[in-house]
């Protein structure tokens, strides 16, 4: 890893900002969460663009409690969708548990 590259320096700055503020780093593009260390060690490319009147990165800093809550919501939604899928499959193919 080239620690002198501009890409690394941008990751390092964002990782330091996240660490100082007690946040994790979220990529809206990949829907992936990074700890500051994971982000620094990643190959992610930080791109600054205008957000309103202020330039901002293509990543978000999020408090860990909020990230955990969001992942739990995603898990619950996935579990609910699976249960509905399972119900439909069992109903469509009359797959009922066999009794003795």
Image (cartoon, rainbow, N blue to C red):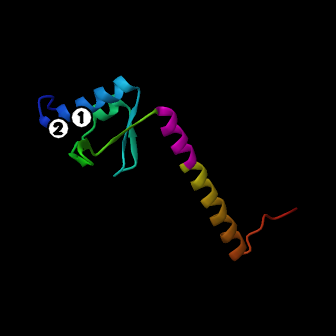
Q: Residue 87 or 29: which is nearer the viewer?
A: 29
Residue at 33% in and 33% down = 38
Numbered circle sitting on residue 7: 2
Q: Which residues are magenta?
A: 64-73
Residue 91 higher or lower than 61, as above or below:
below
The residue under label 1 is: 11
Question: Residues under labels 1 and 2: Cα distance?
Answer: 6 Å
| Quadrant, the C terminus | bottom right
Q: Residue 81 or 55: which is nearer the viewer?
A: 55
Residue 54 higher or lower than 1, as above or below:
below
Where does residue 47 sit, x and y in percent of width and height?
A: 21, 45
Q: Residue furthest bottom?
A: 92
Residue at 12% in and 34% down = 5
Mark 1 and mark 2 in contact? Answer it, CB < 8 Å: yes
Left or right of 20, for residue 83: right
Left or right of 60, for residue 79: right
Magenta stretch: helix, strand or loop mostly: helix
Q: Residue furthest top?
A: 20
Dot 2: what SS? helix
Numbered circle sitting on residue 58: none
Few, some or many residues within 10 Å of mark 2 (<14, 14–19, 20+): some
Is residue 96 highlighted in magenta? no
């Amino acid at each position: 890893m080239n620690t002198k590259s501009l890409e690394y320096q941008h990751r390092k700055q964002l990782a330091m900002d996240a660490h100082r503020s007690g946040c994790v780093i979220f990529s809206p593009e990949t829907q992936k969460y990074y700890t500051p260390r994971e982000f620094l060690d990643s190959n992610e490319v930080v791109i600054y663009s205008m957000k309103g009147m202020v330039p901002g990165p293509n990543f978000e800093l999020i408090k860990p409690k909020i990230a955990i809550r969001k992942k739990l919501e995603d898990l619950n939604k996935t579990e609910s969708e699976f249960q509905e899928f399972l119900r439909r499959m069992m109903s469509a193919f009359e797959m009922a548990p066999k009794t003795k």
